[in-house]
Image: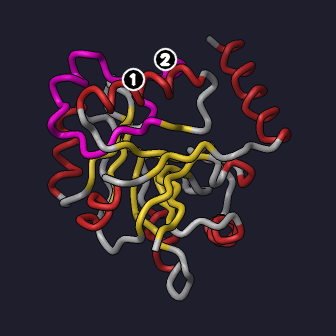
């Protein structure tokens, strides 16, 4: 059975998101998603809450965290068991995910509107990256996603996709169509044949992304 999976989204546990866990779960199901990864910024409580509240629902919740490194952007850990502290080196952050037998998922690796890994760092840790995000629906420039897709294909990295939703309208706008899975091993196997989906965005959501970009430009 195939499902739609959004591998990158946030809840009100993130400092820049106001989506409550219950409404996120309801909305994800309404959007036809079969799996979501909760990846709040530097906190793990939202993922734990979502896993608990999803019991009895027809929705897989992957507990994750988007961890800010010292100066090399962010790394997402999927299938985690506990919170990983922010501010470590890229290498130590990856190691902390590995210690939990989690999956190392690199989000928006070429989004130059934010901090990203240096090219040397990226190449040095290629063998430790389990998944490269090739489509992030929240990016302002599609070229950054295209660059990630080319990189993943060049180095044979499994492709990931997610909405990076911080508002409900964004949930499900980036996703994968993949075989249903149970646990990290089946997840990685399913990724081999997964299809990246760039799902439609509402006008209101597109306008909100444009507004955020304008605010960022003013404070740069």
Residue located 51% across and 67% down the image: 3
Residues marked 2 and 1 touching at CB (< 8 Å): yes
Crowding at label 2, few (<14), some or many (≥20) Cα neighbours within 10 Å? few
Whether residue 30 appears in magenta in the rendering, the answer is no
Total marks placed: 2
Task: List x then y, in percent, for residue 38.
Answer: 49, 58
Residue sitting farthest toward the right: 204
Label 2 vs label 1: CA separation? Answer: 7 Å
Q: Is residue 17 above or below residue 180?
A: above
The residue that mark 1 highlights is: 116
Task: Write the start and end of the magenta stretch as one range.
Answer: 108-134
Residue located 28% across and 58% down the image: 188
Where on the picture, by quarter, is residue 91? top left
Q: Quadrant of the C terminus?
A: top right
Residue located 17% across and 40% down the image: 128
Task: List x then y, in percent, for residue 112.
Answer: 49, 17
Crowding at label 1, few (<14), some or many (≥20) Cα neighbours within 10 Å? many
- Comparing 211 with 5, the one in front is 5
Task: List x then y, in percent, for residue 190.
Answer: 33, 61
Residue sitting farthest toward the bottom: 56
Would residue 167 appear left or right of 160 to someone viewing this image? right
Q: Is residue 24 above or below residue 70?
A: below
Helix, strand or loop at label 1? It is loop
Whether residue 109 appears in magenta in the rendering, the answer is yes
- Comparing 64 with 31, the one in front is 31
- Comparing 120 with 99, the one in front is 120
Q: Residue 112, which numbered label?
A: 2
Would residue 200 appear left or right of 97 to someone viewing this image? right
Q: Is residue 85 above or below residue 34?
A: above
């Amino acid at each position: 059975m195939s499902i739609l999976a959004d591998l990158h989204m946030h809840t009100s546990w993130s400092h820049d998101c106001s989506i409550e866990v219950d409404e996120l779960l309801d909305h994800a199901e309404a959007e036809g998603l079969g799996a979501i990864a909760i990846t709040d910024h530097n906190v793990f409580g939202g993922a734990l809450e979502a896993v608990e509240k999803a019991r009895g629902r027809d929705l897989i919740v992957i507990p994750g965290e988007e961890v800010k490194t010292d100066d090399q952007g962010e790394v997402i850990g999927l299938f985690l068991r506990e919170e990983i502290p922010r501010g470590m080196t890229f290498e130590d952050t990856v190691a902390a995910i590995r210690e939990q037998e989690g999956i190392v998922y690199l989000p928006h690796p070429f989004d130059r509107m934010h901090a990203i890994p240096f090219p040397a760092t990226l190449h040095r840790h290629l063998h430790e990256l389990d998944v490269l995000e090739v489509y992030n629906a929240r990016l302002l420039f599609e070229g950054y996603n295209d660059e990630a897709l080319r990189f993943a294909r060049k180095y044979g990295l499994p492709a990931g996709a997610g909405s990076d939703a911080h508002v409900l309208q964004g949930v499900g706008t980036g996703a994968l169509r993949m075989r249903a899975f149970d646990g990290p091993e089946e997840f990685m196997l399913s990724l081999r044949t997964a299809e990246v989906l760039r799902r439609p965005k509402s006008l209101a959501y597109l306008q909100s992304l444009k507004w955020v970009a304008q605010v960022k430009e003013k404070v740069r």
